[in-house]
Structure formats: C-alpha cells, structure tokens
C-alpha cells in the first residue's frame, strides 16, 4: 500500500489491511504451537457488554488458533453460558470493583501484572488486553503477533484542528499516540509494561496527582521509552465517536 505509513522511524512494521498475507502467517504460527491470551474487564455496569464482546471475539480473534480468554468481572453470576469454539477457552475470574472508575483503571495494570506472574506465564505465549465495550467486526489474525504490540489511536489520524475542537484527547507526545484499549505482546514484555505502568500510577497516587487519561498516559510514556516492535493501525480499534 502506498497510501499509508507502513514502517516506523525505528523500522517496526505498521500493520494495515492489505499489507500482509494471512495465509502465510497462519501457516508459520501453526508450526510453533502457540497459545494466545486475551484479558478483558467487565466491572460494574460493563457486565452488559460481555455477551457482545465474547461472541464477536470468539468468532474473529485469531480464528482457528488456540486462545484463552480471561474475563475479570465483579458479576460472575451474570456471565451466561457462551458457546465457545473448540480451540477457545473462557476463564471467568472474580474481581472486586473499585469505588471510582479511575480506581478500576489503576488496578487493571496491577491485576494483569500479578496474574502474569502467578498464572498466565504458564498458560499462554502471548497476551493481549482489550476493552470489553467493543465488538469485533472483522478478523484479527496472527499478523498482530510480536514481542511488544501497540495500536495507534484513531484520534491521532484526524486533522489537528478537529482534534483541538473536540478538546477530548491530548496531542500525542512522541512518535505516535497509542490507545490503552488494545495492546499486548509476549507475556514477558506485557509483564514489564503493566508492572511499569502500575508503578507509575502508584507514584501518582502517593503524590496526590492524577494523570488525565490514567493508564493510557502511563502506557504511552512506557512505549516512548521502550519502542513497540509492531504497531497496529487505527483500523484495529476505531473510536466510533469519529
């Protein structure tokens, strides 16, 4: 494709539809006998999105490959009996809700980090975090697999004057601005990322400060200092407000 940027200044690929052969990548992935995990959170009112997310993710996320879905929720009794593909497994993990959504956001990084150490590192090779309040509309395949993967925010690709007019997203600091709604990579790299972000959020709390954007700000700080090895285009997580 000639209409989009397909390589970062540090030579990491930027994945757009039409820039890869999924058949070739699937064949290579199958030879390695890998398992990929997906972490998502459905806390408080977000339990409403569980069925829509899981139904679409079961159909479209790494279809035909082994995927473990780890659903953290404070309402496990509201998780219906979902019909999963034979190669997919759903694990419902009870979690307490926070007093504010900011607290839930802060705890998210801590929970992922601690569960990688205790459980996930023994069960999956790659791990991705996705927001629950989305539905997948097309296949997300093994083209997303790499050591440290970030998704370019869809707010970065709109004209700057429109971005300023909305007043809802900061201008990016660095090469790209990444969404915290979809990121991942190898278990080891995601552990480093979530541990660092949780540490930064803890320092903010101790100092009585609260970064606008919360864990997304800390994720972007980390990725500015530790360059992702693969970027996903905004096609992979498009904000419907746009």
Image (cartoon, helix red, strand yellow):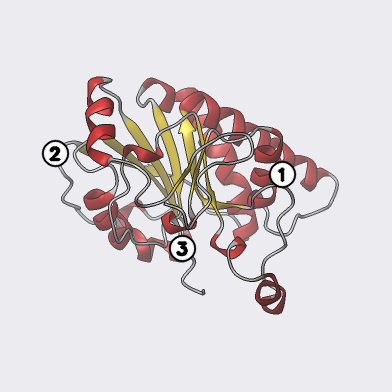
The residue positioned 73% from the left and 59% from the top of the image is 212
| Marks 3 & 1, CB-CB < 8 Å contact | no
Camera-side residue of 92 and 128: 128
State the image coordinates of residue 6 (x, y, percent, origin top left): 50, 46
Answer left or right for 84 relative to 99. Answer: left
Instruction: State which quadrant residue 172 falls in.
Output: bottom right
**In this rendering, the label closer to the viewer, 3 or 2:** 3
Number of the label disc, if any, that sits on residue 238: 3
Number of the label disc, if any, that sits on residue 86: 2
Residue that mark 1 sits on: 201
State the image coordinates of residue 98 (x, y, percent, origin top left): 58, 54
Specify the farthest residue to the front: 2
In three-dimensional space, the C-alpha distance between marks 3 and 1, rounded to whole angstroms, equals 26 Å
Identify whether 49 is placed above or below 23. below
**In this rendering, the label closer to the viewer, 3 or 1:** 3
Q: Sequence-wise, which precedes: disc 3 or disc 2? A: 2
Element assignment for label 3: loop
**In this rendering, the label closer to the viewer, 2 or 1:** 2
Element assignment for label 2: loop
Residue 66 visible within the image = no
């Amino acid at each position: 494709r000639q209409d989009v940027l397909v390589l970062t200044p540090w030579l990491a690929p930027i994945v757009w539809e039409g820039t890869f052969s999924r058949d070739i990548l699937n064949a290579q992935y199958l030879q390695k006998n890998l398992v990929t995990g997906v972490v998502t959170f459905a806390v408080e009112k977000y339990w409403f999105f569980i069925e829509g997310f899981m139904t679409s993710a079961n159909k479209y996320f790494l279809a035909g490959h082994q995927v473990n879905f780890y659903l953290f929720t404070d309402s496990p009794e509201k998780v219906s009996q979902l019909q999963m593909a034979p190669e997919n497994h759903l694990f419902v993990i009870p979690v307490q809700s926070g007093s504010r959504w900011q607290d839930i956001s802060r705890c998210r990084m801590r929970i992922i980090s601690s569960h990688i150490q205790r459980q996930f590192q023994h069960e999956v090779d790659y791990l991705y975090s996705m927001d629950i309040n989305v539905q997948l509309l097309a296949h997300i395949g093994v083209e997303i697999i790499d050591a440290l993967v970030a998704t370019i925010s869809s707010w970065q690709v709109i004209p700057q004057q429109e971005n300023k007019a909305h007043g809802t997203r900061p201008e990016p600091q660095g090469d790209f601005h990444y969404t915290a709604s979809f990121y991942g990579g190898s278990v080891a790299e995601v552990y480093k990322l979530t541990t660092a972000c949780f540490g930064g959020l803890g320092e903010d709390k101790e100092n009585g400060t609260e970064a606008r954007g919360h864990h997304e700000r800390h994720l972007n700080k980390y990725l500015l200092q530790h360059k992702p090895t693969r970027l996903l285009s905004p096609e992979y997580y498009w904000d419907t407000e746009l």
